[in-house]
Amino acid sequence: MPSHDTNTDMSALASSPALAGWHLDLTGDGPAREVAAVRLRELLLRAARFEVFRRRGMLPQLSPTELDELADEAASDAAISVLRRLDDFRGESRFETWAYKFALLEAAVKVRRRAWRGREVTLDPEGWERFAATDVDPERAELFECVREGIRTALTPHQREVLVAAVLDGVPIDVLAERLDSNRNAVYKTIHDARTRLRAHVADAGYLEVT
Amino acid sequence: MADPVLVRLLGTGEHAVDCDECFDQLDRYVEAELARQPVDELFPGFRAHLVGCPTCAEEHESLRALLETEEIR
C-alpha cells in the first residue's frame, strides 16, 4: 500500500482543506462512514429548515410540525443527491457550502410545489392578451404594443404559454416544469428562446434601446 | 428599459448561463461574492441568469443568507 500519493497534482489537491475534510469518510465504510453520514444529515437538515423557515409565509396552512416534516423530506432527498454526486465535488468551495445548495434546492422546490398545489396553472397561449399597456407611460405604449404583437406573432404557441405563465402569471419554473412533465432547465431554455425571439422582433421594429 | 415587466419578458440580452450551470456554480459564486471577489469576471453570465430566473435568484439569496448567518455566529 503506497504511503503517500506520488502524483504531484493529486497531492496538491488532497492537501487542500476542502478536499481533506470529513466528507471523504462518506465514500468509505465502517464506523467512520456512519459518523460522516450523521454529520451530513445534520448539515442538510439545518439548511433545509433554514429554507423552509424563510419561505414559511408561502405555506400559512402548514403547522410547525408539518413544516419540519417538509424540511426533513428535503434533507433526505438532498442526502441522496449529495451522495450520488460526491465525485463532482472538486474542493473549489467548502464542502458544507456545496452540500447546502442541494438542501436549499430540495427545500425550495418542495415549498413552491406545496404552495402551488391545488392552484390552477393556466397554460393559455392566448393569455398574452392580458398584457395591456393601460397603466404605462404613454411614451412607452407603442413599445408595449410592439411586444404584444411579438408575443402573438414571433413566438410558438408553446413559447407563448410558458412565457406568459412564468412572466405574467408568476408561476415558478419548477412548478411549470412539473405541470408540463418537463424539467427546470428545459423550461428555462424555452423562456430564453422566447425572449431572444421577442427581442429580435422589437429590434426589427426599431426599438434599438432594448437590444 | 427599466420597466420590470419588459425586463422579464425580453430579458437583458446578455450572455446568461442556464439553470443547470447556475446550480453547478452557485456554491463557488456565493463564496466568491462574500469574499468580495470580482464575480462578474469569474462567473460570466451568472448574474444575468439570476436577473432572468427568479427561481434560481431565490436559491442564490438563500445560500448567501445561510452563509452570512453562519459567519455571524
Image (spheres, rainbow, N blue to C red):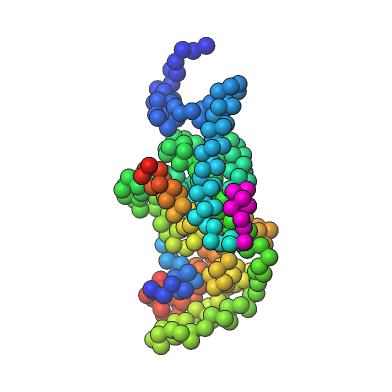
| Main secondary structure of the magenta stretch | helix
| Residue A86 place in picture, x, y as percent | 55, 35
**Residue pictured at 54% horizontal, 29% vertical:** A36
Apparent side of residue A122 relative to residue A137 in the rendered image (left or right) = right
Q: Which residues are magenta?
A: A61-70
Is A192 magenta? The answer is no
Quadrant (top left/top right/bottom left/bottom right) for the C terminus of chain B: top left
| Residue B59 place in picture, x, y as percent | 49, 53
| In the image, residue A62 above or below residue A21 | below
| In the image, residue A52 above or below residue A167 | above
Q: How many discs mark residues in the rendered view? A: 0
**Nearest to the observer: residue A45 or residue A119:** A45
Quick check: can you spot residue A113? no
| Residue B71 place in picture, x, y as percent | 37, 43
**Nearest to the observer: residue B72 or residue A108:** B72
Apparent side of residue A149 relative to residue A80 in the rendered image (left or right) = left
Quadrant (top left/top right/bottom left/bottom right) for the N terminus of chain B: bottom left
**Nearest to the observer: residue A11 or residue A85:** A85
| Residue A184 place in picture, x, y as percent | 59, 56
